[in-house]
């Protein structure tokens, strides 16, 4: 497998609410690992809003939900404090495997029963693909203007990788990444 193919998501949707969760169940998905920043909330918001809390808790009836974030403890614990029975992994160091392995232990599922959902190809998608999760779902960032410096750098690198994928794997680009690339 060419290195750039590890950055290709299973699918792209504009937001977590546009994911077909019934389809995920049909695919054998039992756990959803959500990124926090710009997937569930923008960087400039401190707490998960009530509508997202209710949405996640409803999903938690059918799936094991874990918030997996690269942010530090204070940010993740403050943001997630509103959630009931939904654990989190802080400072997960995605795309490294450390945080995802911790989330696997918390959820009690196998790798082929996980869909990881996040807004960055460089961390969320690449990390999920390295873990060989069943699905790696890319969502459009909620508020890209709130990105931190490192995330802005990652997005520039992401653009180069998207061009590489378009050049070398046009079918996958058209199937999954074209809508994302055009929405940037």
Image (spheres, helix red, strand yellow):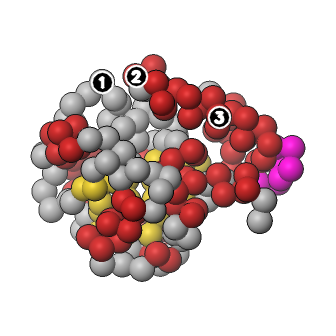
Q: CA distance from mark 1 to mark 3?
A: 23 Å
Secondary structure beneath label 1: loop
Residue shown at 46% from the left, 48% from the top: 118
Residues at badges 2 and 1 in contact (C-beta under 8 Å)?
yes
Secondary structure mostly seen in magenta is helix
Q: Nearer the viewer, residue 78 or 58?
A: 78
Secondary structure type for disc 2: helix
Residue 29 quadrant = bottom left
Residue 101 horizontal/vertical position (percent): 38, 68
**Figure check: 19 above or below 24:** above
Horizontal placement of 159 versus 116: left or right?
right
| Left or right for 137, reference 167 | left
Residue 169 covered by magenta stretch: yes
- Quarter of the image for residue 52 reads top left
Residue 179 painted magenta: no
The residue under label 2 is 146
Q: Measuring from the top left, give residue 153's x and y in whole percent.
A: 56, 28
- CA gap, disc 2 and disc 3: 18 Å
**Residue 145 visible to an observer of this rendering:** yes
Secondary structure at badge 3 equals helix
Dot 2 or dot 3, earlier in sequence: 2
Q: Quadrant of the N terminus?
A: bottom right
Q: Alpha-carbon distance for marks 2 and 1? A: 6 Å
């Amino acid at each position: 497998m060419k290195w750039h193919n590890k950055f290709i998501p299973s699918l792209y949707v504009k937001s977590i609410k546009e994911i077909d969760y019934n389809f995920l169940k049909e695919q054998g998905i039992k756990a959803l690992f959500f990124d926090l920043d710009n997937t569930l909330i923008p960087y400039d918001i401190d707490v998960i809003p009530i509508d997202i809390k209710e949405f996640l808790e409803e999903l938690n009836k059918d799936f094991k939900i874990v918030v997996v974030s690269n942010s530090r403890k204070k940010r993740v614990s403050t943001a997630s404090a509103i959630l009931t029975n939904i654990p989190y992994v802080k400072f997960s160091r995605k795309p490294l495997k450390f945080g995802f392995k911790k989330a696997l232990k918390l959820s009690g599922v196998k790798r082929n029963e996980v869909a990881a959902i996040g807004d960055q190809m460089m961390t969320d998608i690449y990390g999920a693909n390295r873990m060989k999760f069943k699905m790696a779902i890319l969502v459009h960032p909620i508020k890209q203007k709130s990105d931190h410096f490192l995330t802005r750098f990652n997005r520039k690198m992401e653009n180069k990788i998207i061009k590489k994928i378009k050049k070398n794997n046009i079918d996958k680009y058209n199937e999954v990444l074209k809508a994302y690339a055009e929405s940037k």
